[in-house]
């Protein structure tokens, strides 16, 4: 990614932060922990924060963490958000794999393609959550998950911007 | 595919290959865990409880802050229209006084009738009292986090209520926090009846904060707007006579109701033992 090249101010003597290699992973875990916010919602229209930050990082750069970290991060997300254990483990690993394959195929990338990719991934995430809920006895009409899906698709640019700022901060750029 | 090769370095090529293997292993492990947790949810009860003990206290601490801030704002709002509010409250008070007198008479009559029938009162025992400090933010399931756990005697399957009505039942317990399946979750099916007339109905959440109510017997739609739904005590899990919801809209063979205990707005929730203890063992 060449976004960093657009940066103008470069100060001398600033390098990556000591924990730069762990910053992406920690930001994903913090996003999963947003489930501990004292918000009691009855409609459930909040996006899946952990997944949103995960794909923001992965779409920004191909090496935010070693690929296999996706599985333990998914486990943390499952534990904190109350999803069935194993859901995010499988989905997040599959997402990393899918984006590795996408990286091989795409000739060029821009913001629109990233947004479309994110929209596709978020749709898959919501659809699978809906399927799993149906299997475990909570079958709701699919229309009920459309509003949160639309919201999370529109929140993605914000999350991508935050992640790109965080990336520049951790690398000391 | 030649472009995907990370150069001629054997080490880099192996690294890429092993990361693919690790991802596939991650997917497989995830699918196995998912299969276990959907087919046998009790298997992971301990680890889920431990995670709750981390989230619960964090949410409780944040809750104090937001409750204070909200309190300041609503407090300021109350001063705004004090005179109008005063008049309204007086009218409501007079109306309530009349109703209270009526209720007292009914209560007395009820006591006499019970004495005649020699019915034993079902005493309400409280296991623990907590606050709802958080909830599932995601789309399809409706859980809430309650700030009391197994240390206070909360067990999986116990019903949870608030002064306004039924909240749901406990599905996960940690030492200091527990997770409650709200009445508005799709998987929460509650045997209930209409307060007016006592017609048996089934209450099932819709996943969006409202509740579906359907009569047990197919036929004429018995609901009217404003009807109150209460628990019937059938099945032995939920005690009878707890208000659940108020009907807001009719549809073709049932109605949509709004829970009386609004989870986002109740201060305290009470955990009670199951109405008939045998029922606790049956709930997953």
Image (tube, coloured by chain):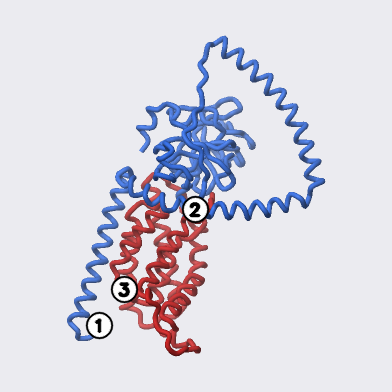
Chain colours: A red, B blue
Q: Is residue B227 above or below residue B51?
A: above
Q: Of marks 2 and 1, which one's residue comes earlier in the chain?
A: 1
Looking at the figure, which quarter contains the N terminus of chain B? bottom left
- Judged from the image, the secondary structure of the residue bearing numbered disc 1 is loop
Relative image position of residue B47 (x, y in whole percent): 33, 49
Give how far apart the Cα atoms at labels 3 and 2 are: 36 Å
Compare residues B239 and A128 and report the one nearer the observer. Answer: B239
3 and 1 marks in contact (CB < 8 Å): no
Residue A16, percent from left and from top: 39, 80
Residue positioned 49% across, 64% down in the render:
A152
Which residue in the protein does label 1 denote?
A: B6
Q: Which residue is most to the top?
A: B116
Which is closer to the viewer, label 3 or label 2? 2
Discs 2/1, front: 2
Residue B231 is marked as none
- The correct choice, above or below, for B103 with respect to B47 in the image is above
Which residue is nearer to you in this view: A78 or B223? A78
The dot on residue A100 is 3
- Residue at mark 2 shares a chain with residue at mark 1: yes
**Secondary element at image label 3:** helix
Q: Is residue B147 above or below residue A158?
A: above
The local crowd at label 3, few if under 14, some if 14 to 19, many if 20 or more residues have their Cα within 10 Å, is: some
């Amino acid at each position: 990614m060449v976004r960093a090249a657009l940066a103008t101010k470069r100060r001398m003597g600033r390098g990556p932060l000591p924990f730069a290699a762990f910053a992406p992973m920690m930001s994903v875990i913090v996003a999963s922990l947003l489930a501990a916010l004292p918000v009691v919602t009855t409609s459930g229209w909040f996006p899946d924060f952990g997944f949103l930050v995960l794909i923001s990082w992965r779409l920004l750069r191909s090496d935010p963490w070693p690929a296999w970290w996706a599985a333990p991060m998914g486990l943390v997300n499952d534990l904190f958000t109350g999803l069935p254990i194993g859901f995010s483990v499988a989905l997040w690993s599959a997402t990393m794999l899918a984006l590795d394959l996408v990286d091989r195929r795409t000739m060029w990338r821009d913001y629109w393609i990233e947004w479309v990719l994110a929209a596709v991934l978020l749709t898959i995430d919501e659809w699978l959550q809906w399927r799993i809920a149906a299997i475990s006895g909570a079958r709701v009409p699919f229309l009920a998950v459309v509003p949160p899906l639309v919201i999370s698709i529109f929140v993605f640019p914000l999350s991508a911007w935050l992640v790109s700022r965080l990336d520049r901060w951790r690398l000391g750029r | 595919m030649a472009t995907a090769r990370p150069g001629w370095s054997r080490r880099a090529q192996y690294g890429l290959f092993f990361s693919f293997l690790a991802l596939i292993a991650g997917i497989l492990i995830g699918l196995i865990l998912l299969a276990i947790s959907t087919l046998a949810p009790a298997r992971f009860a301990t680890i889920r409880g431990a995670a709750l003990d981390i989230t619960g206290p964090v949410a409780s601490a944040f809750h104090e802050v937001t409750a204070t801030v909200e309190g300041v704002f609503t407090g300021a709002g109350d001063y705004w229209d004090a005179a109008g509010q005063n008049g309204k409250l007086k009218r409501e008070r007079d109306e309530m006084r009349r109703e209270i007198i009526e209720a007292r008479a009914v209560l007395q009559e009820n006591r006499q009738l019970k004495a005649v029938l020699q019915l034993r009162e079902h005493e309400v025992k409280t296991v623990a009292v907590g606050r709802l400090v958080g909830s599932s933010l995601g789309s399809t399931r409706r859980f809430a986090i309650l700030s009391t756990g197994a240390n206070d005697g909360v067990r999986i399957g116990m019903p949870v209520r608030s002064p306004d009505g039924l909240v749901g039942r406990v599905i996960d317990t940690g030492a200091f926090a527990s997770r409650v399946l709200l009445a508005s979750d799709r998987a929460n099916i509650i045997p209930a009846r209409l307060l007016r007339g006592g017609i048996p109905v089934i209450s099932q959440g819709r996943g969006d904060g409202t509740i579906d109510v359907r009569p047990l017997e197919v036929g004429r739609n018995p609901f009217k707007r404003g009807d109150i739904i209460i628990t019937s005590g059938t099945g032995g899990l939920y005690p009878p006579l707890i208000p659940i919801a108020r009907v807001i809209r009719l549809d073709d063979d049932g109605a949509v109701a709004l829970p009386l205990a609004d989870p986002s707005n109740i201060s305290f929730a009470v955990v009670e033992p199951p109405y008939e203890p045998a029922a606790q063992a049956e709930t997953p």
